[in-house]
Amino acid sequence: MDTVKILGIAGSLREGSYNRATLRAARELLPANVQLESFERLGEIPPFNEDEEGTLPDAVAQLKQQIREADAILFVTPEYNYSIPGVLKNAIDWASRPYGENAWDGKPVAIMGASISALGTARAQYHLRQAFVFLNMHPVNGPEVMIPSAYERFDDQGNLTDNTSRDLIRQQLESLVEWTNQLKAGSRVLVN
Ligand SMILES: Cc1cc2nc3c(=O)[nH]c(=O)nc-3n(C[C@H](O)[C@H](O)[C@H](O)COP(=O)(O)O)c2cc1C
């Protein structure tokens, strides 16, 4: 079986971010034959301006390159005001442009998220799924990874200590890999 390459993108710039910590936990819970890279330059992406999309900023060019090299995408998103953080949506918009050069096109994708509230980013995750329709991304439907009351589930060093969340992450990564292989076998996605 070929190695599956996943690109992980955490939608928070915060040093002690629960979502960045969740992406680190995912790295510990990968199935065999899977590589997980992350995009680390979210904070360098300028506000999207359609007048400037002809010359991509360096961080956007790198993001698009990393997306194209990945077999699948993993978003790990906070929830801000019941939706996706602006920095993440901004990066998604950049990488979908210019028209006809949507780097997300056809990619299998999974979503995880951690929040301090009881719903664990559910509303933000469903907003992301809506964007996937126009981006032509193929989301894994389950299991959903929504980590509520995050302050109870990570230790002071940012390690995810909650076994239920760790199990869900492990299962979702397995589903993403299976989904990616199914889509590849059926030639329904444009990967690499
Ligand atoms: C602008 C803003 C809006 C927020 N809105 C929500 C929200 O709608 N739902 C929620 O569960 N948490 C909300 N929160 C709290 C986040 O869950 C919390 O800040 C979380 O730690 C953010 O993720 P991070 O730790 O990865 O940075 C909000 C936080 C900020 C800064």
Image (cartoon, rainbow, N blue to C red):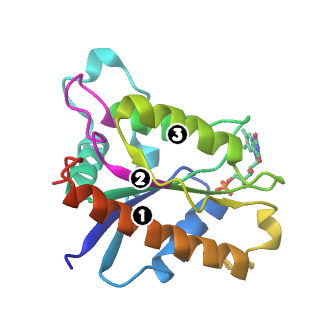
Dividing the image into 4 quarters, which one contains the N terminus? Answer: bottom left
Q: Amino acid at mark 2?
A: Val
Q: What residue is drawn where x is 52% and y is 32%?
A: 130
Residues marked 2 and 3 touching at CB (< 8 Å): no
Q: Position of residue 126 (x, y in %)?
A: 61, 40
| Mark 3 close to ligand 1, CB under 8 Å | no
Disc with the residue nearer the chain's start (2 vs 3): 2
Q: Amino acid at mark 1?
A: Leu
Q: Amino acid at mark 3?
A: Arg
Q: Residues within 10 Å of mark 1 (few under 14, many from 20)?
A: many
The dominant secondary structure in magenta is loop
Name the image quarter holding residue 154. bottom right
Against 166, is 110 above or below? Answer: above
Disc with the residue nearer the chain's start (3 vs 1): 3
Q: Position of residue 122 (x, y in %)?
A: 69, 47
Residues marked 2 and 1 touching at CB (< 8 Å): yes
Q: In the image, which disc is placed on residue 176?
A: 1
Q: What residue is drawn where x is 42% and y is 64%?
A: 176
**Element marked by disc 3:** helix
Q: What residue span does the magenta drawing correspond to?
A: 95-110
Name the image quarter holding residue 155. bottom right
Q: What residue is drawn where x is 39% and y is 46%?
A: 138
Q: In the image, which disc is placed on residue 129?
A: 3
Q: CA distance from mark 3 to mark 1?
A: 15 Å
Q: CA distance from mark 2 to mark 3?
A: 10 Å
Report which residue position mark 2 lands on.
Answer: 109
